Image: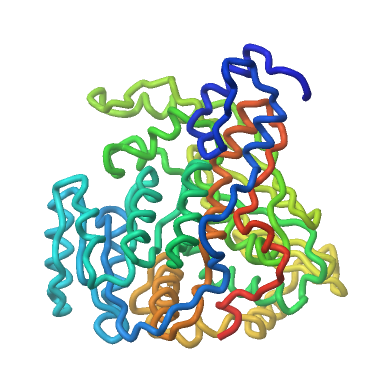
Amino acid sequence: MKGPLNRRSFLRISALTGAFMGIPSLGLGGKTPDIEELLDRISATPSPSGQSVIGLTVPPIKQVRVGIIGLGMRGSGMTKLIDALCPDKAKIVAICDLQEKYTSRTLEALKKNNQNPAVYKGDPNAWKEMVKRDDIDLVFIFTHWDVHVEMAVESMRQGKHVAVEVPAAITLEEAWQMVNTAEETQRNCIMLENCCYGSEELWLLNMARQGVFGNLTYGEAAYIHDLRSLMLDHSYYNQWRIRHHVKHDANLYPTHGLGPVSQYMEIDRGDRFEYLVSMSSPSVSLAEYSKKMDYSNEFYNRNDFIHGDMNTSLIKTAKGRMIHLYHDVVTPRPYSRNNCLAGTGGYHEGYPSRLALDGKDSHRWLPDNEYKEMRAKYDHPIWTRLKAEIEKYGGHGGMDFVEIYRVIDNLNRGIQLDMDVYDAASWSVVYPLSEISVQLGSVPVKFPDFTRGRWKEPRKLQILLD
């Protein structure tokens, strides 16, 4: 690996400008760089410009005043869940979207619950005016990925807490900018990873913490979801999602599967991601599917998609554990997040959920009656406590409601949030790191330590404390 880059590798590096952003100035001075020098700079830890926000708490906010950016595909459903907590726990003060059809629809719906938020619309910079308001405590961001960090950073600088959709960041520069701003402002900035609040995921988290799986060794995480029709039609604003498949070959959407597995393994709470290796299959499915589009579609009969049909990455942790991470949104196969967890005491495999335990017949899954006993014994109590609300409001089987409830309720009570900015950065940065690994021939790429060494400190997730 040592030595100067050859021309082909150097061109690969050049093509990865966006992914490498965030490394301190390369300072090449016209010379051909050493590949190890470049890879080392990816994992370098800059000096802090603020104080750590690990365990951050703020005084209780009896009624959380909310501003919402993005009211379309994802934002419309999530806004309904926030509205469900009003007025007792929250109040929607302002809403914002570039498209007036979404602000009008949302305002009409909110008025039915006696809410009359200020409306910001039309101007691409309207959100900047909204976050300047002094009557907002928390900003929710439900926009497309490319503007997540810009909006989150400005909101924190205006004194607001932030909850941003997944992935929170898509470049190294963005990940560090998000972390540094949270530390400078002492504001919460969390990623809204709803899958961490699924009934199955919280059950596994409970079992892992109570030792059912013994010494954890490896896990599998995935986002396998056939999105061809959604990406190629106009479901997404300006078809933004498919554009990532034209420009990037990487694990574009890692956090739905990785978030829960990271929590099982106490990532950044006693263990950390150390490095990953990533590779992709050929890109075939989107080109074939694009032939089915109407000829007026920008992506009709295109063959310039570079994202492989399947991207798979192996992540090694500081404790030597392994996580196998998959991304496939173009193959005609059933939805799965895999959700596998292995240890000396047992093994779980999701989709469908199945459990095997040491001391039982190791060649068989637990029979239904024993599986149900384990579910009853280790289910997280929040799903029982919020059963009526979950059934009423739903959202991906209820996980969306539980997620929104926890963000608001934790701020109401003045306790730390269930996730923090370090989780957001560590989970999201798989996107650029996997791209670098793929383009450089599946070389190992080290993760930055966003906690600046504090990952070694064992600490419990708030969701397990109350």
Q: Residue at x 74, y 49 (%)?
A: 316
Q: Residue at x 45, y 25 (%)?
A: 305
Residue 303 rendering spot, x and y as whole percentages: 43, 20
Residue 202 lies, with reference to residue 453, above or below; the image says: below
Q: Is residue 168 left or right of residue 217?
A: left
Visible residue check, residue 328: no
Which of the pair 350/450 is nearer the observer?
A: 450
Q: Residue at x 85, y 70 (%)?
A: 361
Visible residue check, residue 237: yes
Which of the pair 154/50 is nearer the observer?
A: 50
Q: Residue at x 39, y 46 (%)?
A: 145
Which of the pair 33/285 is nearer the observer?
A: 33
Which of the pair 16/292 is nearer the observer?
A: 16
Q: Quadrant of the C terminus?
A: bottom right
Furthest residue in direction right, as rendered: 359
Residue 50 rendering spot, x and y as whole percentages: 51, 60
Q: Quadrant of the N terminus?
A: top right
Q: Is residue 65 left or right of residue 189?
A: left
Residue 445 rendering spot, x and y as whole percentages: 68, 38
Residue 43 lies, with reference to residue 64, above or below; the image says: above
Colour mapping: rainbow
Answer with the quarter of the image where residue 364 lies.
bottom right
Answer with the quarter of the image where residue 163 lies.
bottom left
Total count of labels = 0
Q: Is residue 262 left or right of residue 336?
A: right
Answer with the quarter of the image where residue 153 lies.
bottom left
